[in-house]
């Protein structure tokens, strides 16, 4: 039987394609990241999905927060940049490859999710060129080593769609301490730096307070922005269902801090929920 393998599409551009260079770069980001002790094993993190040049240092804070822990499965929830879909696309079998090796898909969890809700599709086309999921995988491989992957791409990101996905995750995950949720999201896009910082601060405050309604309202009214607002809301809703309501924003920056161009920037945030 032919194994369904998703090949990397942004290796060599958004992050290094050479495995030794890639691991060295991620190790460097992790070494620079300072994260105070998290008192309990995290159930979810929020990590940006720009190229490593822009967001690698921010992402490293989220991944450093889970360093030293083991998870049998990681659920990565990404928005869809390439195509519209009214549901959540599940790559339910096979593996995802990066320059650091292949990650086996947790077929059992994927099947349980699809049985738990009608909001899923096994149409994998949204995965073919999606960067926001792939960009998380090398960090996970370096920090966690062995784990299985449950790769999800969200189409609709309205609060009810997020709640349905969170409910499906809650029903399908037997041991929440053995499964990590990764919400892949950048923040505001193409505003002047001062405006971006104000908008992004609203997201950060909502994440720290686990203010699901406030974040959903701000996103709906465009008082804040997150291209992975759905994944963030889903992670918060899932954590709330578990009564795991401690959250910390770990790092924030925007592209202007890297390029020096503050006329039009993109925001990046990392956070941990435990």
Image (spheres, rainbow, N blue to C red):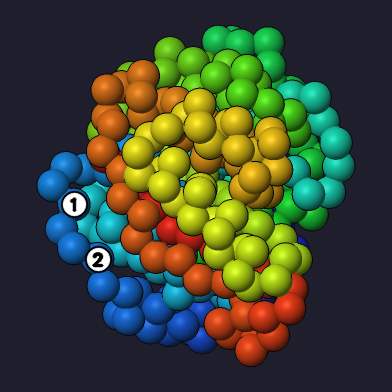
How crowded is the residue under tag 1: few (<14 C-alpha within 10 Å), some, or many (20+)? some
**Which of the pair 135/111 is nearer the observer?**
135
Can residue 147 be spotted in the picture? Answer: no
Compared with 182, 58 (above or below) is below
How crowded is the residue under tag 2: few (<14 C-alpha within 10 Å), some, or many (20+)? some
Counting from the top left corner in percent of width and height, residue 114 is at 61, 17
At 65% across and 57% down in the image, what residue appears?
A: 188
Disc 2 to disc 1, C-alpha distance: 8 Å
Residue 40 found in image quarter: top left
Compared with 99, 89 (above or below) is above
**Which of the pair 191/16 is nearer the observer?**
191
Going by the picture, which residue comes out furthest to the bottom?
260
Q: Is residue 120 left or right of residue 200?
A: right
Compared with 31, 250 (above or below) is above
Counting from the top left corner in percent of width and height, residue 140 is at 43, 58
Q: Quadrant of the N terminus?
A: top right
Q: Is residue 176 left or right of residue 80?
A: left
At 64% across and 64% down in the image, what residue appears?
A: 195
In this figure, which residue is indicated by the disc labeled 2?
35
Q: Is residue 257 left or right of residue 145?
A: right
Compared with 168, 147 (above or below) is below
At 43% across and 58% down in the image, what residue appears?
A: 270
In this figure, which residue is indicated by the disc labeled 1?
38
Going by the picture, which residue comes out furthest to the right?
83
Verify CB contact (< 8 Å) between mark 2 and mark 1.
yes
């Amino acid at each position: 039987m032919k194994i369904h393998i998703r090949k990397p599409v942004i290796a060599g551009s958004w992050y290094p394609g050479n495995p030794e260079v890639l691991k060295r770069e991620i190790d460097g980001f992790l070494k620079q990241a300072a994260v105070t002790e998290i008192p309990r094993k995290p159930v979810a993190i929020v990590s940006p999905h720009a190229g490593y040049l822009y967001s690698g240092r921010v992402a490293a804070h989220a991944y450093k927060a889970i360093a030293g822990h083991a998870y049998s499965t990681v659920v990565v929830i990404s928005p869809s940049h390439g195509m519209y879909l009214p549901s959540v696309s599940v790559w339910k079998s096979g593996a995802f490859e990066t320059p650091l090796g292949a990650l086996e898909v947790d077929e059992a969890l994927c099947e349980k999710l699809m049985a738990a809700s009608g909001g899923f599709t096994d149409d994998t086309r949204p995965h073919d060129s999606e960067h926001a999921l792939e960009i998380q995988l090398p960090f996970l491989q370096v920090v966690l080593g062995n784990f299985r992957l449950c790769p999800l791409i969200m189409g609709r990101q309205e609060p009810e769609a997020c709640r349905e996905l969170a409910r499906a995750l809650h029903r399908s995950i037997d041991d929440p301490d053995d499964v990590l949720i990764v919400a892949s999201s950048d923040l505001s896009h193409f505003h002047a730096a001062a405006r971006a910082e104000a908008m992004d601060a609203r997201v950060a405050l909502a994440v720290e307070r686990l203010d699901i309604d406030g974040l959903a309202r701000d996103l709906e009214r465009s008082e804040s922005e997150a291209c992975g607002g759905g994944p963030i809301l889903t992670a918060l809703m899932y954590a709330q269902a578990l009564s795991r309501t401690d959250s910390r924003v770990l790092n924030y920056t925007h592209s202007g801090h890297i390029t020096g161009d503050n006329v039009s920037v993109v925001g990046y945030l990392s956070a941990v929920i435990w």
